[in-house]
Amino acid sequence: ERVKIGNSVESIGEYVFSGCSGLKSVTIPSSVKVIEGHAFQKTGLTSVIIPEGTKSVGQYAFDYCQDLSSVTLSSTVGIIHHCAFYGCYSLQSITIPSAVSYIGGDAFYCRSLTDVYLQS
């Protein structure tokens, strides 16, 4: 139900937790620079904090995490790939840090998303 990723991990690989519907909580350390594509797709996550140090959220990384209602992106995130949060239908608001230089298509294809805050 809960995963704590070790402090020496620098990248969360493709599909590593994909389809783990029982996964409700994850602790991502600041050592993680990249969350690769499909890493957490179709999990049961309800909230996620992308920590300081993380630079990129991969394509479909949190695809169809339908219970994901809270996402915190640190100020170091610079790239949000396409469909990163596609189908996160419980997500209602998101704050995009000023470091973000690229947001891919359908990155936030979330039918409940009503508030997007862009930091300057």
Image (cartoon, grey):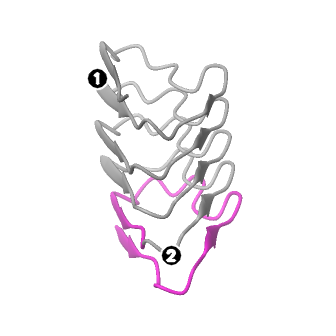
Kindly indicate whether the residue at mark 1 contacts the one at mark 2 (C-beta within 8 angstroms): no
Eyeballing the image, is 105 above or below 77? Answer: above
Give the prevailing secondary structure in the magenta stretch: loop
Image x and y of residue 39, in percent: 61, 55
Eyeballing the image, is 73 above or below 2? Answer: above
- Give the crowd class for mark 2: few <14, some 14-19, many >=20 residues within 10 Å: some
Image x and y of residue 78, in percent: 57, 44
Q: Which residues are magenta?
A: 1-29
Picture quadrant where residue 22 is located: bottom left
The answer to which of marks 2 and 1 sits earlier in the sequence is 2
What's the CA distance linking mark 2 and mark 1? 28 Å
Q: Is residue 18 visible?
A: yes
Amino acid, disc 2: Ser
- Give the crowd class for mark 1: few <14, some 14-19, many >=20 residues within 10 Å: some
Which dot marks residue 92? 1
At 34% across and 38% down in the image, what residue appears?
Answer: 67
User: Considering the numbered disc 1 on the image, is that residue within a helix, a strand or a loop?
Assistant: loop
Which dot marks residue 21? none
- Point out the frontmost of discs 2 and 1: 2
Amino acid, disc 1: Gln
User: Considering the numbered disc 2 on the image, is that residue within a helix, a strand or a loop?
Assistant: loop
In this rendering, position of residue 54 left or right of residue 69: right
In depth, the one of 80 and 23 nearer the eye is 80
Residue that mark 2 sits on: 31
Image x and y of residue 14, in percent: 71, 58
